[in-house]
């Protein structure tokens, strides 16, 4: 028997608990449902409220209409989209999403036959990368067009009744836009040219039509499979075929060899006529967007190209002065380009760099630079072939971007940082790209602290070495093997005796060397938050030193990173020892310099190292966290929120096949540790001397 | 059709018919010169670009037997040199492939040499410098190589981890020949000759290979090799449709990732 629905007063009370004050009508509306629906809807309001009370209020206002139009699942999806928008751009854009209620409801219905952008975007991105040319990103927008670096596609296609056809339409759109980039639609100063016409928009429209015809010819040659699809799709939707459009402008024939310039010529002849309609796969054109991006790129790539040349000339000069021991001998070097046939380029040739007439191997990435320049201009113009002067050479345009600290010094943007998600237990979902993390160098201090520690624990160090040596696993000779390097004389004698007494002779008469190959990678992440100030920080550093001594014995690969942060926008890791660094004085100095700084946003760091582990090839991967076990950050990352995020991050490690292990340095363990560390193993210690032995235990458990 | 497979001793493996090989650069001349001056050769290059075919071709040119050892991570020095076996109550020494090659003046080709265990360098090093001897500790002999003997090995720098890199002391003993995928024109010619298909189809296959090579590093570890193209070409000439042949021979061979597979299949269906 189901319970009676909530009454008006009960609903009002629940909303009051959330500090939400709404119109009578909203509550009245809610009273109409059964108790389960009421509860679900109230939960949704509460979910919105956990993000912002403003958001919850806005949701309440639209709830009636939403229930009318959508299923509960769709409402939740709609709310999630709004929450994402809120996280990224604030309440205003979240309300915008709320206001798209009708179209989102519509969209959800269409999803049954249509195909959504998210379903195909990854595949299309691979697809377009396989086609030649500059790397193109794929994103969604209201219209489909390209700005020469990104292809924009609508977020849903529902033109045909079959899902497959809608997918093919996406593909044809992508190819059409790719062809605009690859076959030189954007090589001319189109805005300038169109502005000479009475009606520039009209001229652009015509240019688009003629270009589409031209590109179709090109695609027919290059990608006949796609061309067939294009024709099939236009027949399906009853569009005029290209052929008929061609006829209407018959005197000015277009072939597969025509260029964008030919198209422009035709525009000048037909622009007074009304432009015909195009097929659905022919996207739109946005010359303004292209202009913006293209101009910036041309300048940037010209600089880059000339810098490359300057470097090449520099190297040549150095080589020559080394040979002749005469530094005054700095001849002028001439750089030229030679046209070479290359069927993979749009015009059928590429350029080879030549220094003083000899072909030179272009450095990494320069080939794609050349290809990009050809795509924009059609050739390598002469003024590109002047090596950049001294002044220019030093300023590389990208230099500022990669330096993490500069980014921070500037505005609040996230360029150059690693972006990580974060788990919000209240919403039961991730906040995407929520934390910005940067790697920051740590300076190396003196090694006094190390020496002091080693003296203090000299007895222990020996002990640790011995414990770890046992772990090392020696080569073992396996006896009585069917196949091996050498003969096992004992086994042979036995076998021979067996044969003599009429038994069957055993085959297992060899010895074989069994090599125990250790293939372990460990990352230690060390808490550098303010709460470790005092004995915990000392304990951390001492433990690290003892551990390093032990791990050097084992010969395993290990890395040490410090971490601290201040809000989600400023998470920092300090590479104390990377996998490549050796355990030398510099590393030791960096260990001494680990000092308490800001806060502990544990989750993001665990995710960062999970990601780092992806590139490490090792049979066993261990992530050891050294902290005081108090996840805390300035912007609400505390209590249950922090604990849950940490728990989920550790769960992700597990799923990735990493063994997470948490060492908490504290006088006594807090009761939430069991929940927080969940699947990960953990220990609480308050004495450094215990640590290496604990770690040896972990090792034994994990690796044997 | 009931002929049994021919059984050969390794040192009798003479290549009788000329293996088809199109030179990319001067690798044939360099190899011949190195052979003449008794310097060992290291072939570098991605999988399926013709390293093994090149070795067969050179063995045919030099009229020497070719002994190929495919190295794996359990291959030890005694697998190369030889071991004692028991036969009729007595131990009997059996030469390993490397010892056979030295003894009979053959070409020994160690394929994917970085995969082998580290202790194999102990026997490779003295053979690879001007000493040209193979120490056979277990029988207490030093086997001196004749001038016919030649040591060659291959390795693929593409997918080596730090753990499996060739040591400097090893690589600096060899003349290195770098192999890469041939130019489009040459690759087309190779496919036509190997798979017996027409020019237009071969050109499309090469174009398709270039598309997959564009994807290298962004989801694919390696693009389609010439070998894969030849496989696809052979199936096509036996009547399989090009799209199906590309799907089975190339796409499936390159990746297991569903989205990447779909993308590669779409690429091939746009071409044919």
Image (cartoon, rainbow, N blue to C red):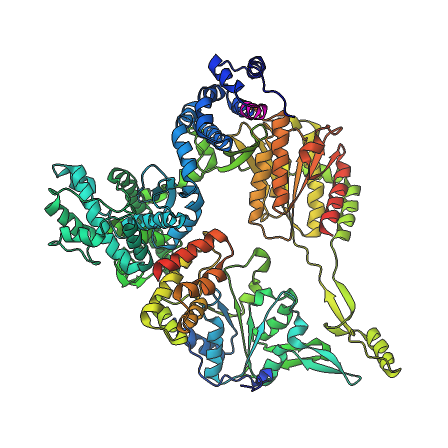
Q: Pick the residue in front: B46 or A32.
A: A32
Residue B224 lies in what quarter of the image?
A: bottom left
Q: Main secondary structure of the magenta part?
A: helix
Q: Can residue B247 be seen here?
A: yes
Task: Locate residue A258: give its quadrant.
Answer: bottom left
Q: Position of residue A3 (x, y in %)?
A: 63, 22
Q: Position of residue A565 (x, y in %)?
A: 56, 30
Q: Position of residue A161 (x, y in %)?
A: 37, 46
Q: Nearer the viewer, residue B105 or B50?
A: B50
Query: In the image, what residue occupies the spot 22% across and 45% down?
Result: A208
Does residue A629 belong to the magenta stretch?
no
Q: Which is nearer the eye, A482 or A580? A: A482
Query: Is A39 inside the magenta-drawn segment?
Result: yes
Q: In this view of the protein, which residue sits in the foreground, A506 or B141?
A: A506
Left or right, A368 with respect to B48, comes to left
Residue A340's place in the image compared with B38, above or below, is above
Relative to B202, A459 lies left or right: right
Q: Quadrant of the N terminus of chain A?
A: top right
Q: Which residues are magenta?
A: A34-42
Outermost residue to the right: A501
Count of number-bearing discs: 0
Evaluate whether residue A596 shows in this view.
Answer: no
- Horizontal and vertical percent position of residue A172: 33, 50
- The image shows residue A81, relative to residue A53, as above or below, that is below
């Amino acid at each position: 028997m189901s319970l009676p629905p909530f009454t008006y007063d009960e609903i009002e009370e629940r909303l009051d608990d959330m500090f939400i004050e709404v119109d009578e009508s909203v509550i009245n509306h809610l009273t109409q449902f059964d108790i389960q629906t009421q509860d679900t809807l109230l939960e949704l309001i509460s979910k919105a409220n956990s993000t912002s009370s403003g958001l919850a209020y806005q949701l309440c206002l639209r709830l009636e209409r939403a229930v009318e139009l959508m299923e509960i699942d769709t409402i939740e999806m709609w709310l999630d989209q709004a929450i994402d928008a809120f996280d990224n751009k604030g309440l205003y854009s979240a309300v915008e999403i709320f206001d798209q209620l009708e179209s989102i409801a519509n969209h959800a219905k269409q999803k049954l036959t249509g195909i959504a952008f998210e379903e195909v975007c990854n595949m299309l991105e691979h697809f377009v990368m396989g086609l030649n040319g500059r790397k193109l990103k794929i994103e969604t927008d209201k219209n489909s067009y390209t700005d020469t670096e990104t292809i924009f596609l609508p977020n849903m296609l529902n033109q045909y009744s079959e899902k497959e056809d809608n997918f093919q339409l996406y593909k044809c759109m992508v190819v059409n836009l790719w062809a605009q980039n690859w076959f030189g639609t954007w090589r001319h100063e189109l805005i300038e040219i169109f502005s000479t016409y009475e009606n520039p928009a009209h001229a652009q429209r015509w240019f688009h039509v003629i270009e589409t015809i031209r590109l179709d010819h090109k695609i027919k040659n290059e990608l006949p499979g796609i061309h067939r699809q294009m024709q099939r799709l236009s027949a399906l939707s009853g569009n005029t075929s290209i052929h008929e459009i061609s006829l209407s402008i018959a005197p000015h024939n277009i072939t597969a060899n025509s260029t964008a310039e030919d198209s422009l010529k035709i525009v000048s002849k037909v622009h007074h006529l009304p432009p015909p309609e195009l097929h659905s796969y022919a996207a739109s054109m946005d010359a303004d967007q292209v202009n913006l991006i293209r101009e910036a790129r041309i300048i940037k790539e010209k600089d880059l190209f000339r810098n490359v040349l300057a470097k090449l000339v520099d190297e040549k000069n150095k080589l020559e002065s080394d040979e002749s021991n005469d530094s005054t001998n700095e001849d002028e070097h001439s750089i030229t380009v030679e046209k070479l046939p290359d069927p993979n380029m749009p015009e059928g040739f590429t350029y080879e760099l030549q220094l003083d007439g000899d072909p030179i191997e272009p450095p990494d990435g320069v080939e794609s630079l050349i290809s990009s320049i050809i795509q924009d201009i059609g050739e390598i113009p002469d003024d590109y072939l002047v090596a950049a002067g001294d002044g220019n050479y030093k300023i590389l345009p990208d230099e500022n971007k990669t330096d993490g600290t500069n980014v921070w010094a500037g505005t609040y943007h996230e360029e150059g940082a690693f972006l990580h998600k974060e788990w919000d237990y209240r919403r039961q979902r991730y906040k995407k790209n929520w934390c910005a993390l940067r790697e920051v160098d740590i300076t190396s201090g003196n090694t006094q602290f190390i020496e002091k520690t080693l003296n203090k624990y000299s007895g222990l160090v020996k002990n640790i070495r011995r414990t770890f040596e046992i772990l090392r696993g020696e080569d073992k000779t396996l006896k009585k093997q069917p196949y091996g390097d050498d003969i096992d004389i004992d086994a042979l004698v036995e076998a021979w005796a067996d044969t003599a007494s009429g038994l069957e002779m055993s085959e297992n008469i060899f010895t074989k060397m069994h090599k125990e190959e250790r293939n372990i990678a460990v990352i230690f992440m060390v808490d550098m938050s303010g709460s470790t100030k005092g004995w915990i920080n000392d304990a951390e550093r001492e433990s690290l030193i003892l551990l390093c001594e032990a791990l050097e014995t084992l010969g395993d690969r290990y890395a040490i990173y410090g971490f601290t942060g201040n809000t989600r926008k400023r998470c920092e890791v300090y590479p104390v020892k990377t996998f490549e660094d050796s355990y030398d004085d510099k590393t030791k100095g960096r260990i001494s310099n680990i000092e308490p700084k800001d806060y502990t946003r544990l989750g993001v760091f665990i995710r960062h190292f999970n990601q780092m582990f992806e590139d490490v090839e090792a049979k066993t991967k261990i992530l050891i966290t050294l902290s005081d076990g108090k996840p805390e950050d300035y912007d609400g990352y505390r209590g249950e929120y922090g604990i849950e995020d940490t728990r989920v991050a550790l769960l992700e490690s597990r799923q990735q096949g990493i063994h997470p292990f948490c060492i908490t340095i504290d006088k006594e363990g807090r009761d939430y540790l069991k929940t927080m560390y969940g699947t990960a193993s953990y220990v609480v210690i308050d004495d450094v001397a215990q640590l290496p032995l604990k770690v040896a235990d972990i090792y034994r458990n994990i690796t044997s | 059709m009931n002929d049994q497979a021919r059984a050969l001793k390794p040192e009798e493996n003479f290549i009788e018919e000329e293996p088809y090989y199109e030179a990319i650069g001067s690798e044939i001349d360099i190899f011949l010169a190195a052979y003449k001056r008794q310097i060992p050769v290291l072939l570098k290059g991605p999988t399926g670009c013709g390293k093994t075919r090149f070795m067969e071709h050179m063995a045919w040119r030099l009229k020497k037997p070719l002994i190929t050892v495919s190295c794996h991570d359990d291959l030890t020095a005694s697998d190369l040199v030889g071991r004692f076996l028991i036969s009729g109550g007595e131990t009997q020494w059996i030469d390993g492939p490397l010892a056979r090659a030295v003894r009979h003046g053959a070409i020994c080709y160690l394929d994917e040499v970085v995969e082998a265990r580290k202790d194999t360098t102990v026997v490779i090093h003295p053979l690879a410098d001007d000493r040209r001897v193979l120490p056979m500790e277990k029988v207490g002999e030093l086997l001196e190589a004749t001038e016919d003997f030649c040591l060659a090995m291959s390795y693929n720098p593409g997918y080596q981890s730090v753990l499996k890199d060739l040591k400097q002391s090893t690589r600096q003993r060899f003349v290195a020949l770098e192999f890469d995928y041939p130019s489009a024109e040459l690759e087309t010619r190779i496919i036509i000759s190997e798979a017996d298909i027409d020019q237009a189809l071969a050109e499309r296959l090469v174009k398709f290979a270039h598309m997959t090579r564009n994807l290298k590093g962004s989801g694919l570890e390696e693009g389609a090799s010439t070998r894969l193209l030849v496989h696809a070409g052979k199936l096509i000439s036996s009547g399989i449709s090009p799209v199906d042949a590309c799907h089975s021979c190339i796409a499936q061979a390159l990746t297991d990732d569903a989205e990447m597979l779909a993308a590669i299949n779409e690429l091939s269906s746009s071409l044919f």
